[in-house]
Image (cartoon, rainbow, N blue to C red):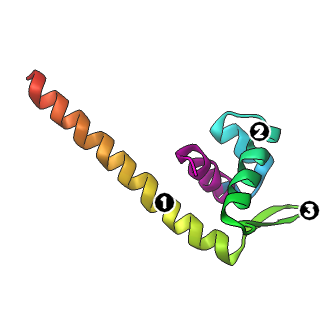
Amino acid sequence: MELRQLRYLLAIAEVGHVGRATQRVHISQPALSQQLCKLERELGVALFTRHHRGVSPTEAGLVMLDHARKILDQVEEARQAIESLNEAKTS
């Protein structure tokens, strides 16, 4: 599992469509679909139900989205803490 896959997962869920999520994460639709499939294979579950108007999260997808948000928030907090530490050393 990679952080970028978690970012992609959130983008897809937020817009409800793989094609529209590509604009948000700046990659092609085939690449985004491939990363989503790779994550689903790794987890052994479908994270979205695909339908003609887009996608909606499965039960497993909702659980994964909750964890993805927390993980990405913690990564951002860590990055900010390190930046603050570096700024304090250079001041």
Q: Residue at x 50, y 65 (%)?
A: 67
**Residue 51: where, in percent of width, then height?**
88, 65
Residue occupied by mark 1: 69
**Which numbered tag is attached to residue 31?**
2
Above or below, 17 against 90 in this view is below
Q: From the image, state whether disc 1 or disc 3 is nearer to you.
A: 1
Q: Secondary structure at mark 3?
A: loop
Q: Amino acid at mark 3?
A: His
As measured in the structure, the alpha-carbon distance from the residue carrying label 2 to the one carrying label 3 is 20 Å
Describe residue 90's horizontal placement relative to residue 7 as left or right: left
Above or below, 71 against 83 in this view is below
As measured in the structure, the alpha-carbon distance from the residue carrying label 1 to the one carrying label 2 is 22 Å
Task: Please tell me how crowded label 1 is: few (under 14), some (14-19), or many (20+) other residues with Cα within 10 Å.
Answer: some
Q: Residue at x 79, y 63 (%)?
A: 55
Counting residues from the start of the chain, the first of labels 1 and 3 encountered is 3
In the rendered image, the quadrant that contains the C terminus is: top left
Q: Amino acid at mark 2?
A: Ala
Describe residue 61's horizontal placement relative to residue 85 as left or right: right
As measured in the structure, the alpha-carbon distance from the residue carrying label 1 to the one carrying label 3 is 27 Å
Q: Amino acid at mark 1?
A: Arg
**Which numbered tag is attached to residue 52?**
3
Residue that lies at the very extreme toward the top in this rendered image: 90
Above or below, 72 against 62 in this view is above
Tell me which segment is drawn in magenta: 1-14
